[in-house]
Image (tube, helix red, strand yellow):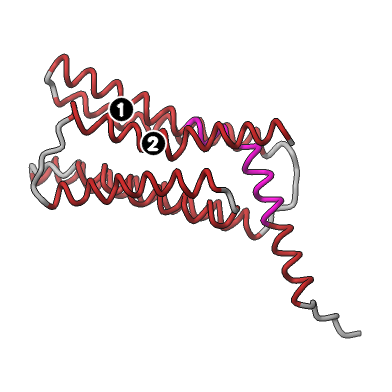
Amino acid sequence: MEDRKLTEKESLEIITSMIARTKERYIGNANILLMWGYLVVLTTIAVWILLDVTHNNAWNWLWFAIPVVGFTAGSVMKKNHRGRKTVKTYSDRVTSKLWTIVGVSEIVVAILCLLMQCFADVNCWSAMLVYSLLVVPCAEIAQGILLRENSLFFGGLVGLTVGVITLCLIAGGIVLYANWYLPIFIMAFVAMMIIPGHILNHKAKNQ
């Protein structure tokens, strides 16, 4: 017996259903987004204050707390969230792979910056700021389009705008001093992660 071919309408309904289920799971799991957002913001504030008070660049090592704490806490939160057994859709897999690529590439850039600092005495840490404000917003915009969630799309757009401005400033030879740049960096992550995270949690409560 031949398999019945799906009509265009049925195909669209299946795709819409997969997106809806992925969105529902993502909305219920916005705490991971909030965790990353608050972790980046609090770490940035700590680095900003310590640099301003001590004028010691060694405090920049605190940036490494973000991946260490973030990936550890994220793994625990994801494990707890998987306790609810549901069928994983194609949209779920795309979302997972998207953020895996972002995370791995961030680590690679950080390692390259560290190697340049240790073996060539070249300070290129500003590349981390630019990269974070380009790759993370692009991933968030893509996810916002995939899930049809405006808070992710527009939050990512704000972050990407700040990233492009940062790239132009560095290309123009403008030094990114902590006292004026880090507040902008903080606002970008508030727009990208904290505000959308709270919006998604609010939607989850109303469902």
Q: Is residue 4 left or right of residue 200?
A: right
The x, y position of residue 24, in whole percent, is: 69, 44
Callout 2: 10 Å neighbours few (<14), some, many (20+)?
Answer: many
Label 2 belongs to which residue? Answer: 189
Secondary structure of the residue carrying tag 1 is helix
Main SS of residues in magenta: helix
The x, y position of residue 11, in whole percent, is: 74, 71
| Amino acid found under the numbered disc labelled 2 | Phe
Specify the farthest residue to the bottom: 2
Label 1 belongs to which residue? Answer: 44
Q: How many marks?
A: 2
Q: Is residue 12 left or right of residue 98?
A: right
Which residue appears at 47% of the width and 32% of the height?
194
Question: Which of marks 1 and 2 precedes in the sequence?
Answer: 1
The stretch of residues the image draws in magenta is: 19-35
2 vs 1, front mark: 2
Callout 1: 10 Å neighbours few (<14), some, many (20+)?
Answer: many
